[in-house]
Amino acid sequence: MKQELVLQTRNGRRERLELGMNFKEPEDQNKGKPILSDFLDDESMVKIIQDFLNEIPHRIETIESHFDSGNKEQLCRIVHQLKGAGSGYGFKIITTNAQALEKKIRLAEDAWQKTASKARENLVAILYRVYAGRNISGQA
């Protein structure tokens, strides 16, 4: 079942992002609050950050697809890439959450999906919030 995420841009326009996999939004107090890069003040980073942000929907779908299909190796690869990239683009929270998921995946054996499920949900929720901030404060 496909779901979609509706985002409101800085200029008030609503944008729909169709998601390829099922996703349950986290029930936390920060749900929906956009996360912005720490490097917004650096004009030389704006285009690079935008390119990174534009890849997030694909990365979310890839994470969900590999998780759902049980492809532990490929899931670890993309999560490891996000762990390294997050801080480099000014999103330390991505690095922190990707590291937590990677650790759960690597340490768990047979029941790794059950063990890593909450960490995956947390990382995906963070990625949605980062993507939601792409049109704010110069990231457009």
Image (cartoon, rainbow, N blue to C red):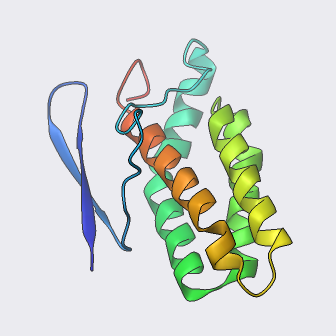
Tell me if 114 is positioned left or right of 96 in this view.
left
The x and y percentages for residue 132 are 37, 38
Toward which corner of the image does residue 14 lie, by quadrant? Answer: top left
The residue positioned 68% from the left and 71% from the top of the image is 115
Toward which corner of the image does residue 116 lie, by quadrant? Answer: bottom right
**Residue 33 or residue 87, whichever sits in front:** 33
The x and y percentages for residue 100 are 74, 52
**Residue 8 or residue 122, whichever sits in front:** 122
Answer above or below: position of 66 versus 3.
below
Tell me if 78 is positioned left or right of 37 in this view.
right
Tell me if 140 is positioned left or right of 103 in this view.
left
The residue positioned 75% from the left and 70% from the top of the image is 105
The x and y percentages for residue 140 are 37, 29
Answer above or below: position of 98 versus 79.
above
**Residue 134 or residue 43, whichever sits in front:** 134
The residue positioned 55% from the left and 18% from the top of the image is 40
Tell me if 97 is positioned left or right of 136 in this view.
right
